Image (spheres, rainbow, N blue to C red):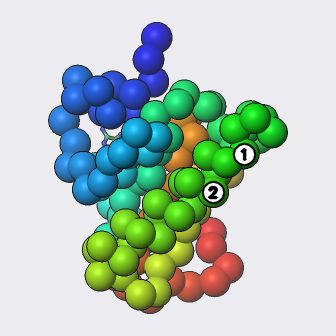
Amino acid sequence: MPTLFTRIINGEIPSQKVFEDDAVVAFRDVNPVAPKHILVVPRQEITRLDQVTDDDEALLGRLLRTAAKVAAQEGLKDYRLVINNGAGAGQSVFHLHVHILGGRPLSWPPG
Ligand code: AMP
């Protein structure tokens, strides 16, 4: 079964895409928790951060670099990147993704 995000990447589920290349796709979160809330997702189905292997570690750099590019494209100077790893940390979709959050002051520590 393809993941929800694979179905979004393939266009089976509508989304507002803001970036895509051969390895990574970024689209707006359907339930934003900040004025700018974008998900940066690898095309490759990796369930969660701790399942990334050494063979795939370059993909992590690609995800972070893409997140920075997308944030700049969105006009964000200050923003937060979040990866929830596991249900106890808030992960609800088990296809690795980076949240870009911005457009409002972000407090620390997060909840
Ligand atoms: P996480 O809880 O870290 O796994 O993040 C999953 C994110 O996916 C949540 O912020 C959801 O709001 C978001 N999401 C769920 N379904 C969709 C969808 N169809 N389109 C865009 N974002 C979605």
Residue 29: x and y in percent read 33, 53
Q: Quadrant of residue 64?
A: bottom right
Total number of numbered labels? 2
Q: Quadrant of the C terminus?
A: bottom right
Residue 87: x and y in percent read 65, 40
Picture residue at 52% right of the left edge, 47% below the top = 97
Tell me the SS state at disc 1. helix
The quarter of the picture showing ligand 1:
top left
Which is more toward the observer, 54 or 91?
54
The answer to whether residue 73 is seen in the rendering is yes
From this view, report whether residue 59 is shown above or below residue 79.
above
Which is more toward the observer, 56 or 111?
56
Location of mark 2 (residue): 61
Residue 79: x and y in percent read 47, 79
Residue 63: x and y in percent read 54, 54
State the residue lying farthest toward the right. 54
CA gap, disc 1 to disc 2?
A: 7 Å
Left or right relative to 42: residue 11: left
Left or right relative to 12: residue 72: right
- Asked whether disc 1 touches disc 2, contact meaning CB atoms under 8 Å apart, the reply is yes
**Amino acid at pointer 2:** Gly
Tell me the SS state at disc 2. helix
Location of mark 1 (residue): 57
**Amino acid at pointer 1:** Glu
